Image: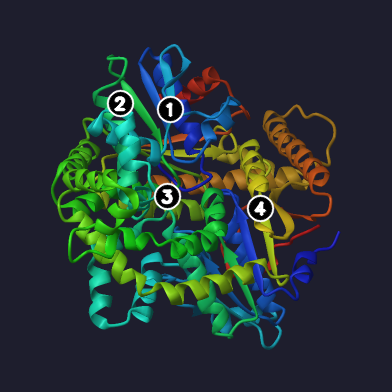
Amino acid sequence: MIGKGGVGKTTLALAQAAYLSSQGKRVLLVEIADRSSVSTLLGIPPLAYEITSLESSLSAIKITGHEALKEYLMRQVRIEKIYRLFFENRPMRYFFDAAPAIRDLMILGKIVHELEHPKSGKLFDHIVVDTPATGHGLFLFKTPGIVEKITRFGPIFQRAFHIQSILESPDITSIHVVTLPRPIVITETLELSLSLKKLKLPLLNLFVNRLIFSQKKFSAHEIAAFSQKTQDPTLQLLSGRFLNELRELKRLEKLSKLPLHIFSEIVETPTLNQLADWFGKAFS
Amino acid sequence: MNKNHLLSLIENQKLVIVGGSGGVGKTTLSASIAIQAALEGRKVAVLTIDPARRLGTTLGFRHLGNKLHYISDQKLKPLQKRPGGSLAACMLDVKGTFDGIVSRYAPSSFIKERILLNPFYVQLSEALSGTHEYMALEKIYEIRSSQEFDLLVLDTPSSDSFLQFLEAPLRLKSFLDRDIVRWFSTPRETTIGRLACAAFGKQFSSALSLLNKLAGGTVLADLANFLTDFQSLFEGLRERTEEVEQLIKDREASLFLVTTCEVITTTQLHQLLEPLKAFELRLSGFILNRTLDSLQSKSPSMNPLELALSNTAKRIITQQEQLKKRLKKEQPKVPIFEVPLLKKDPSKIIDLAQLSFTE
């Protein structure tokens, strides 16, 4: 799930995860780096770098670069004491500070690791990833290529190569781009889709979030008529805004080659069931 | 009620920083503040750090780049600009600014080329976490020292990186003060890290050789080269960083936090307020974006569309009232400005010039 800040990536990632889980799939929801949107949305304590169960078949984890790197290095040296001796010192921390790409690669590496070798031994059917906003999100996807350039050979190079091949494979990965029915956001979304395509990432869906309400309920005609008629400036404003949103949707339908799925407002602090429902209705 | 109170509040300010979480409208509001100040006759520059290209789109540039672009007087004149006022905009291009620093401070063109081609440099200059914020400082310095402007409006990236931005001077300073560069780089003609081994013992050299094995043999040599070369830029950077740090904390700088009234953004706003205290920054105001006026018709309607719209409006209004109450209670001295929701998000200069910030 990728998109610019504030479009509702977390809500949609969580909703998709809840939906898949309600269909009987084993799902892992991944939150990346120093965000805590998933827990804010659900009103639960912040997620940690440990798979926590949210529901019978839905688990969640927060992956930070620091902890993912530690886990990777631990797999190489195996003994915590040695890891601490080797890597928990200032020069080493500094080395990894100077190479943010390696740290970010480890985040992707951890996701791939959970995909291939889950701790429980039972594979997840789906891993849903809530990425950071556009800029950092894009950088994250660029890291395998960047790390390949820094290292040129060796195990980390091979790791980067493997991760890249998984990201590029349409059988394994699908990218969903989230947007809003507003002119500037849509322009940015189209630019983002282009950048993702250049990285050879398999784009699958475009999710348009936060339509004032479901478009199926009322026709554009009906709304336009109401907007003309109403005396209340606030209602006139909202109906006018809704009409503009519908217009933006039309524009997006024309410009984007991806299938569109449209989501209207959802209640604040929704439950997992409400999220799954909301997602299922818009998706089917 | 004072329509342009925000503008009079910043009348004597030299730097206006606009912060807040993603999607609340920081870029639009920054552009609007900048335009309105320019119309009042000030020489304004607006800088966006947000990697997205919104500011350019809004101000009508096809390619808003690393250099300042002036908005033509013809575009501003019809808006009754006072004489003397001007508006320039620029979008922070991290790599461009970084390359600029290297070119300016590198002691020789040989070292300059070597830095620019080093793979560590290449990834650092592309990475967003960290580098971005330093480059913003550099750009602020550049714009300020050109003395062409009397107001700089800064549109910051969303919350987590906004804090990183505020921390940047401090982090850069500690980075520069550390003798860490030596650990990796001093003995690079001999074996890497010999000096470091003296300081950190044998485990450090074992760690280095393991790292060499994991990351391919040339990585550490590249890093050592990079750090040594980069060291030569440090002095110039350090001075600038200190000046910008002063500028941000100055009485002539103000910070506005933008939010909308949704639960998520409200929560994010509060997550931002706590760490902000540590930065000795004066919070000049909250800007509550996309607010609604209360409904006039009180009686419930039979028309399902009207009912649905009324319910949406009521929900938004309740949330915004709750948020205002909470902010007033927590920060009684900080004014709250409201920017109304519009039929269409403002995207033209004329819309931005007319946006009202009502207290």
Q: Residue A134 carries which label?
A: 3
Q: How far apart are marks 1 and 4 (CA)?
A: 30 Å
Residue B262 can be seen in this image = yes
Residue B345 can be seen in this image = no
- Circle 4 — which element? helix
Whichever of callouts 3 and 1 sits on the residue coming sooner in the sequence is: 1
Whether callout 3 and callout 1 share a subunit is answered yes
- Circle 1 — which element? strand
Indicate the amino acid at tag 3: Thr
Q: Nearer the viewer, mark 3 or mark 2?
A: 2
- Residue designated by label 1: A61
Whether callout 3 and callout 4 share a subunit is answered no
Q: Could you tell me residue A85's position as x and y percent? A: 33, 38
Q: Is residue B291 above or below residue B109?
A: above
Of residues A42 and B177, the one nearer the viewer is B177
Q: How crowded is mark 1: few (under 14 residues within 10 Å), some or many (20 or more)?
A: many
**Chain hosting mark 3:** A
Indicate the amino acid at tag 1: Ile
Are circles 2 and 1 on residues that touch, CB within 8 Å?
A: yes
Are circles 1 and 4 on residues that touch, CB within 8 Å?
A: no
Q: Which of marks 2 and 4 is in front?
A: 4
